[in-house]
Image (cartoon, rainbow, N blue to C red):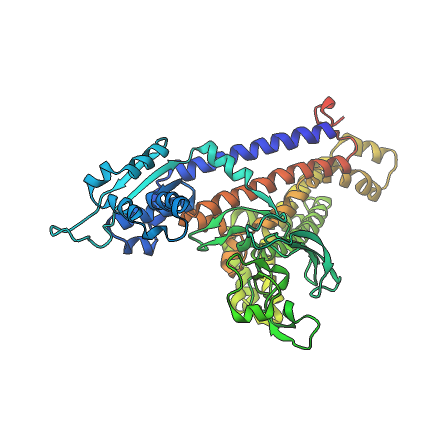
Amino acid sequence: MGKYLLKRILFSIFSLIVVIGIVMVLVYSLISRRVIFDSDDMWTKKNLNDRTMYEYTMWQKYGYLTYVDYGSFLKEKYQAIYGEGYENQPDYKADRDAVKKKDTYESNASVAEFKEKYKADEIIYLEPQTYSNGDMKPGGRPYLLAVHEKSVFSRLWSYFTGLVTVETKNMVKDENLTDRYIRFEKDPYSWAGTALVGSGTQHKYLLYFDERFPFIHQNFIHFNFGTSYTTYRGQEITTVITEKTGSLKKTLQQFPAKIGTDEWEETAIDFHSLQYNASGVTNPADAENYNDNYTVASFKKTGLSMIGNSFVIGLISVFISYLLGVSIGILIARKKDKLVDKLGKAYIVFIAAVPSLAYIFIVAAIGTGVFKLPYKFATAPQDKLYLAYILPTISLSLGSIGSLMKWTRRYMIDQMNSDYVKFARAEGMSEKEIYNKHISRNAFIYLVHGIPGSILFCLTGALMTERVYGVPGVGGLLINAINLHDNAVIVAMVLIITTISITGQILGDLLLAKYDPRISLSSDSGGGRK
């Protein structure tokens, strides 16, 4: 089994890299990069060279390319010579203004130095746009750039090598911070009383406990899926899907500098999320409330995160689907061609034939009209938010119940007609023993493999169901990102979905081998049934 797992894992990693590479080619190479400006209000407000410069800036943010501008080059050059105050030096001013006229641009030594340094890149000179009297047009300022187009392989390499980061005590670049450590300390914000705390790390609390499930949390390892610049402007994708979506939750707490005093304040600040403020503590209130530069924090909120909402709805629906789908499937198989079987087959046909959107609206109409359940998450009462989960959970279960009924019935009937069942009956075994010990166990072999994948795919949400009921989940993230050309979100969601699919397949194989000892995962037997 060990060799099998190793081969599957290595092949899965290779497949994952190939899939992400193909997606990157589609997103970054085959689709025009100008589509990202289709709904960009800032782009429409720019003119001439300023618009072109804005395009390069956004293309760099989205990951199409990298560029170095002449101004940054001059700043680095003259800071090394003069230090602070370099911008007041005559030679710096002369080199800076050289790009304002084409003749001085072509003869300037610093421009030639810039071109030589970045000769491997594309040099782009945006000439000044002026009126006939020489005045600069709005947006017509000159720019000099060295543009480096990213290849698929370099983009793929940088993405996977930077996908996971681990915080160390040297992560914060601040010469004034000399006391650097990672150690366990007393935690005044936790019931456990202790936490792994860092100094020099980006986060102060690296490992801590609180009352939120799963009760133990970490800021030590980070998954860098990129930044959303369209769907969620400027937010990290990890934060988008894991941050709670409800209202602020204020509690009575003490600021770090007030620990041990009688000063308490009602605040929603999550002190376990404290991050280092590289610019220092400039706010007098922060200087009074904090002991160090760890002053940047997020806020506590009610409800669940986007991925949490999707997972809860999906997990409950999976449980209901298997409970009802398998149970009813067994029942109609045992009552083959009788009334209950005909009713079951009618349901299976109905679910398969009717579009999912239709029966989702049927459930919504009955739930809101008869049982007075909230239709949208936004309209659900905050003290009874759990009611908002009922309709989407039921709607999501209906299709899976029909599918599981169909396959359970089919597998059960196949086993009922097997020779070993006829032999068992001839030996005098009761029908109950035959069903419990033989038919059910063998029929479930075909269903067991899909259980891990069904559970894991709850993390990806359900597009149609979540959109109808206004669920703040991850179901629509990929579609919205495709519509808005949010490249980082597209790649991140494909990565998550592909990883879940691969993991579900491997866990399904392991569960199947555990369920049925006749199935071998050893490479010697070809990974099949002995």
Judging depth in this view, the residue of 257 and 140 nearest the camera is: 257
Q: Quadrant of residue 185?
A: bottom right
Visible in this render: residue 44?
yes
Residue 126 in the image: above or below residue 239 = above
Q: Residue at (84%, 42%) from the top-left corner? A: 433
Q: Is residue 498 left or right of residue 483?
A: right
Q: Position of residue 238 (x, y in %)?
A: 55, 51
Tally of numbered discs: 0
Viewer-side residue, 335 vs 227: 227
Quadrant where the C terminus lies? top right
Q: Is residue 413 left or right of residue 425?
A: left
| Residue 158 on image: x %, y % | 50, 37
- Of 447 and 458, which appears nearest the observer? 458
Expressed as whole percent of the image width and height from the top left, the position of residue 231 reads 44, 54
Left or right? Give the position of 298 relative to 217.
left
Residue found farthest to the top: 524
Which residue reaches farthest right? 428
Q: Position of residue 157 (x, y in %)?
A: 51, 35
Residue beneath the point at 31% across and 47% down = 92
Relative to 412, is 355 above or below?
below
The quarter of the picture where residue 261 lies is bottom right
